[in-house]
Amino acid sequence: MKGFDLVALGEVALDVILAGVDRIPRRWSELGRVRATGIFAAGSAGYVAQCFSRLGGRAAIVGRIGDDGAGKITIEGFRQCGVSTRYLAVDKTAETEVSAVIVYNDGNKSSVVSQVPPVNLARLSTACLERARAFHIGGYLVLPDLWGRSILRWIKSAKRKRTLVSLDPQMSATGEWSKPFEHILERLDVLLLDEAEAKKISRKKRTFDAVETLLSRGCAKVAVKAGKKGCIVGDQARILSVRPFKTKPVSTIGPGDAFDAAFVYGLLQGWTVEKIAKFSNVVAALSMTKLGCMTAIPKATTAEKIAESYYRG
């Protein structure tokens, strides 16, 4: 049986997105308006798996959802994107995480999230990693039950199989930033995170210093998503800043996850870090041009051509 190009493990959820909200009414008698709505299989790991699949890779999702209506919609969303749900645990004792996301007309956003169910890795099998080319951990700090020995068993299993290992922490559920990464950083092929996360984990005030520190702690590669500034990427040879690919955003939900998917895709192609950064900037920017970050992502060959043309000058 052919293995997966990417196995994404971690946060799995259902996003209900309201885009172009003019105001939030305070009374039942008042009415707010929205420009567009969407319901999507989501979560940090969930979005990465779907974006990777849209690029043309073979992806599987690993996590835990409830045996409920939200869970059924989530599974169907993954299947529509071509993501395997074979290793997605459906738990009758859990409730699927649901996030209501509001994107205002001025571009700002806010959200309310239900309780995040633990993944319970001890009850899941590492069989999905057999012949997998890449293993991505999404929403690591959101899920404290993954921290320490729990995720180390999976990482070590992946490394024994020479599988590329990537991780995106997201914001910490407990306020703890350093301890969860003990014995983890030195085992990562790439750490993918935003500027705030990089500074918190490294305890540095400047992004470049944060990247340098994380590399010194053993990460093979570090990629920092810097929004309108593009990205800052580094390996043991150098650290560079790559300007953004500019588009007109429709929704700003999920571009970081699209960036992650693109970066892992590029690593699997054997591209240079600079080429991967440019490719990832393009994919992340395109993901914002439609509601649902995976819906606007083209095949990798198309995104690659766009990146080559845009960054040629």
Image (cartoon, rainbow, N blue to C red):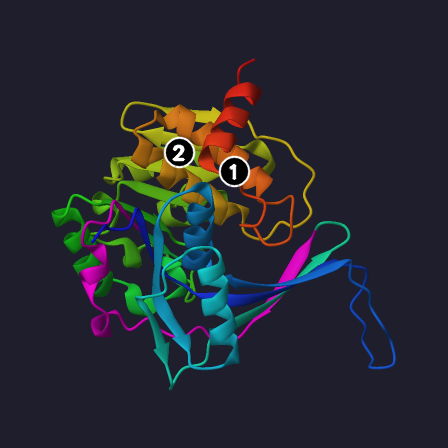
On screen, residue 26 versus residue 273, left or right, reads right
Residue type at mark 2 is: Asp
How far across and how far down the image is residue 166, in percent? 31, 46
Task: Report which residue position mark 1 lands on.
Answer: 283
Horizontally, is 98 left or right of 193 in the view? right
> What's the distance in space between the residues labelled 1 and 2, CA to CA?
26 Å
Furthest residue to the right?
A: 29
Other-residue count near label 1 (Cα within 10 Å), few / some / many at <14 / 14–19 / ≥20 = many
Q: What percent of the width, then of the height, locates residue 255?
A: 54, 46
- Whether residue 183 appears in magenta in the rendering, the answer is no
Give the SS element for disc 2. Answer: helix
* 64 versus 197 height, above or below: below
Question: Residue most toward the left?
Answer: 160
Q: Dots 1 and 2: beta carbons under 8 Å?
A: no
Q: In percent of the image, x 69 and y 47: which residue is there? A: 250
Labels 1 and 2: the sequence-earlier one: 2
Which mark lies nearer to you, 1 or 2? 1
Q: Quadrant of residue 262?
A: top left
Q: Which span is picked out in magenta?
A: 108-135
Mark number, residue 209: 2
